[in-house]
Image (tube, rainbow, N blue to C red):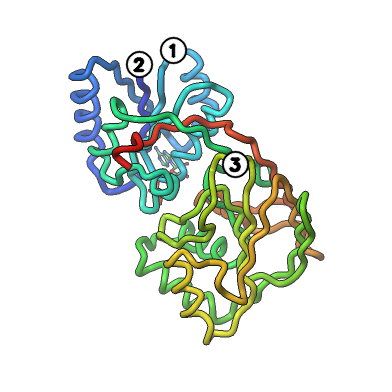
Amino acid sequence: MRRLLFVMNPISGDIDKAELTDLIQEVCTGRGHVAELFNTTGENDLEKLREHIARGDYDAVFAAGGDGTVNLVAQAMVATELPMGILPLGSGNGLSKDLGIPQEPEQALQLVWEHQIKPLDTLEVGGQFSTHLADLGFNALIVERFSAGDTRGPGAYVRVALQEYMGYEPAHYRIVTDQETWEGKAFMLTIANARTFGSNVVINPDSRMDDGRFELCVIEPFPATAAPGILYRLYTNDFDDSEYTRRLRCRHASIEVPGQAEALVQVDGEPLQLPLPIRIEIKPRSLQVLVPPPAAE
Ligand SMILES: Nc1ncnc2c1ncn2[C@@H]1O[C@H](COP(=O)(O)OP(=O)(O)OP(=O)(O)O)[C@@H](O)[C@H]1O
């Protein structure tokens, strides 16, 4: 891996980007690599990045940013055979946590010379690219509230979640997969390629990101008295141990909300309005990622 591209989001995280850029250059040059930088602008980044990668003759491309930057870089890489590395700089960094990548950017930089390449499945959710987790319902609403305001951090999430929970009306969903049909009300419905949210909530325990399948994780409406128990299970890897949860494992699926033409969906941390029904397809092993070697995991 000689030529490396680092795709950096200048506005993500609290870290000093000039210092990090210097560190990347110093570390890469010292080890005989050539490091180039691509700064995102927030405008047409996918198109520009695809063209840049096609011209560049790179051996690997690193996403240096939050979940949105990881999604962008992954999307630009799926059609290539190039591996993607991650330097986590966002607030959640969901995919990098799921892959066991160190959360300190300086440590994650070791992936340049110490790594294994792992193939990952990716998803298409209503035509949107997703590597990690997407959902409809309560969490999508909170993510939208967050992106509309300037609140940040776990404390703010809990505050907003409590406010919204009071008047929240769960929608009725109809899910048809290649395996089964499920219909009913759901508090939230997560479309999961991965296991864990950036908040460390384990929504999809014991799942693999390279098995050609994904999971639909349903939390049904529950009385307020059941909330602490559900929350506890979400942090202790016990999603299935509740009478209000169920998971559907499948290769493709379609989600309808009877009587509704569109729905709010969060896809890898970005809130979007998507037309219904939402079709979900998996692209098995379509993305190569750099993860720590087995001994370092
Ligand atoms: N130069 C830029 N100026 C303004 N917005 C940008 C720029 N570059 C990227 N963006 C926007 O930043 C968002 C992605 O941010 P990213 O997820 O990387 O960081 P974050 O939001 O701080 O992290 P997290 O998602 O973990 O909270 C996208 O909406 C993208 O359009």
In the image, residue 171 lies at what x, y percent?
70, 70
Q: Which residue is mark 1?
A: 57
Q: CA distance from mark 3 to mark 1?
A: 30 Å
Q: Is residue 141 above or below residue 4?
A: below
Disc 2: which residue: 3
Q: Are marks 1 and 2 in contact (CB under 8 Å)?
A: yes
Q: Is residue 43 left or right of residue 18?
A: right
Question: Pointer 3: residues within 10 angstroms few (<14), some, or many (20+)?
Answer: some
As helix, strand or loop, the secondary structure at mark 2 comes to strand
Residue type of the residue flagged with mark 1: Asp
Spatial separation of the CA atoms under disc 1 and disc 2: 7 Å
Residue at image coords 58%, 24%: 79
- Judging by the rendered image, the residue that carries numbered circle 3 is 211
User: Considering the numbered disc 3 on the image, is that residue within a helix, a strand or a loop?
Assistant: loop
Label 1's element? loop
Q: Position of residue 196 (x, y in %)?
A: 46, 55
Location of residue 172 (image quadrant): bottom right
**Which quadrant of the structure image shows residue 276?**
bottom right
Camera-nearest residue between 170 and 106 = 106
Within the displayed image, which quadrant is ligand 1 positioned in? top left
Dot 2 amino acid type = Arg
Horizontal relation, residue 120 to residue 221: left or right: left
Q: Earlier in the sequence, mark 1 or mark 2?
A: 2
Q: Nearer the viewer, residue 263 or 219?
A: 219
Q: Position of residue 212 (x, y in %)?
A: 63, 40
